[in-house]
Image (cartoon, rainbow, N blue to C red):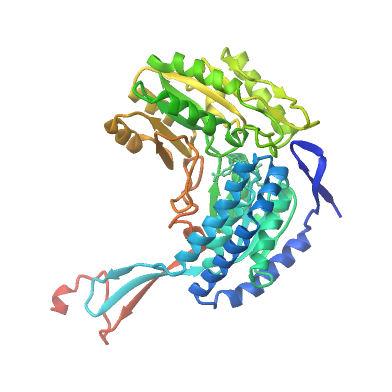
Amino acid sequence: MTIFDSLNPARPAEIIGSFRTSTHIDIDEAVERATDAQKAWSAVPIPARAEMIAAIGDVLASRKAELARLVTVEAGKILTEAGGDVQEAIDMARFIAGQGRAAWGTTHPCELPSKFGFTTRHPVGIVGMITPWNFPVAIPSWKAFPALLAGNGIIIKPSEMAPACCDAFVSACVDAGIPDGLINVVHGFGEVGAYLAAHPKVRAISFTGSVATGRKVAIAAMEVGPKLLSLELGGKNAAIVMPDADLDLVIEGALFGGFGTAGQRCTSTSRIVAHRSIATELTARLAECTAALNIGDPLDARTNIGPVINAESAARILAMVERAAEEGNGIVVGGKIAHPEGCEGGSFFEPTIITGADRNSYITRNEVFGPVVAVLEVSSFDEAIDTVNDCDYGLSSAIYTKDVNLAMEALHRLDTGIVYVNAPTIGAEIHLPFGGNKHTGNGYREAGSRGLEQFSETKSVYIDYSGRLQKAQIDNREALS
Ligand code: NAD
């Protein structure tokens, strides 16, 4: 039996919980339990499923403070951000509950007389969910609630770095009355996720994590036969700053977007693409504000930047910054591993601003997933758009300008799944679709009205009430008239 510990990234001597790595037998049994429970659940009327999801939202709301504290000590988010993580799950429960009384398909006129067409949704069966550590309550909720509403059984494999948060989320579901066996958690590292992804009885896989892992999950899932496969992957998000932008707003947004969650959001602003005419002033002011940020214990209300998730992550971020420096980029502020007081052994990284990089630099092409922002200079709007789009990722982008024509032009031309105008690249709301283009995903979206797509099969239904054989796609109009 293999046991692993979840540690507080700010004080790794503090063990948040010990977890048993699920064996193949455990996973097989979880799939069997979910299969049995799903049969009954799929027969429950959809509005009644929705009521159960609303009840989960109420339980989560009643536990918000304790859950937020758990997110802080296990994932290292400062308390306000941890509260936001839990709030997203509450909001998602309420939104998805509402979807239980919304349209469940579309109606269509038919080519032939006395014939009617419509679509409806059906459960896929058993859904495997593999989740990252950085939204340890929100992301399981983005996947679990639409999957439940659609009538599925669920197996979640949370990140090995935030297993306690996922257990607490599932406890809220169980305490709200979700039937036994419908939601199951399996714990462990990549190997557990790989077994789940390849499980022949798991019909759909919903994965969120890095591009590198997403590729492995896709290969494992498809090896056993076609599955529904949703991949929500990394980002290299950019904010364009035009000469007419409100620089105070840009700086506030850059600090929040670049350094919130210590830069460990898929939508974190890691590139600022600034017009040359304001780039020097912007960089100087941004560096000054960055240097004033408090790094430290995320439980302390004065802290702006908590830890990164672990020592390996801090070392990886450092290596990326060192490589940027070797390539001749400037480190204007930050650039080092930090050791704040009272957080012995914790993994912290100074908020860092890099200059001198262009669109081909290593630091501007690769996801850092840490508090590192590169400022790139451009000479025109067109160059700014090309710079943002010249990137493998396509999750989130922003433009700061007071010119409505430029803003409209940008939102059409930016090749990202999410675009913000005069706001940072983070701040998605759960009732709009979430996801990205290019290497960021494979076309699905989470949340919003599209969140159900990955968890349901669409069925097209034709009802012919003519009482005679009618042949579609045959040019028989004359015969009919
Ligand atoms: P990760 O890819 O390292 O791990 C994600 C999950 O995959 C974990 O549960 C992990 O145990 C599991 N896993 C690892 N190897 C596996 C394998 N071979 N087969 C199956 N499962 C495996 O990601 P992370 O460090 O937890 O999260 C950070 C990444 O997630 C970043 O790239 C970030 O941009 C991305 N992310 C994307 C979104 C989005 O919606 N697009 C949201 C949050 C995070």
The extreme bottom residue here reads 467
The reply to whether residue 198 is in sight is no
Query: Residue 136 at x, y = what percent?
Result: 64, 49
Q: Name the residue rendered at 62%, 49% in the picture.
A: 217
Query: Residue 46 at x, y = what percent?
Result: 49, 73
Query: Residue 40 versus residue 334: which sits nearer the camera?
Result: 334
Left or right: 433 with respect to 478? right
Query: Residue 167 at x, y = what percent?
Result: 71, 57
The extreme right residue here reads 1
Q: Name the residue rendered at 60%, 22% in the picture.
A: 292
The extreme top residue here reads 328
Q: For residue 38, which quarter of the picture?
A: bottom right
The reply to whether residue 146 is in sight is yes
On the rendering, which quadrant does ligand 1 occupy?
A: top right
Please say if 167 is above or below 40.
Answer: above
Q: For residue 353, which quarter of the picture?
A: top right
Please say if 71 is above or below 399.
Answer: below
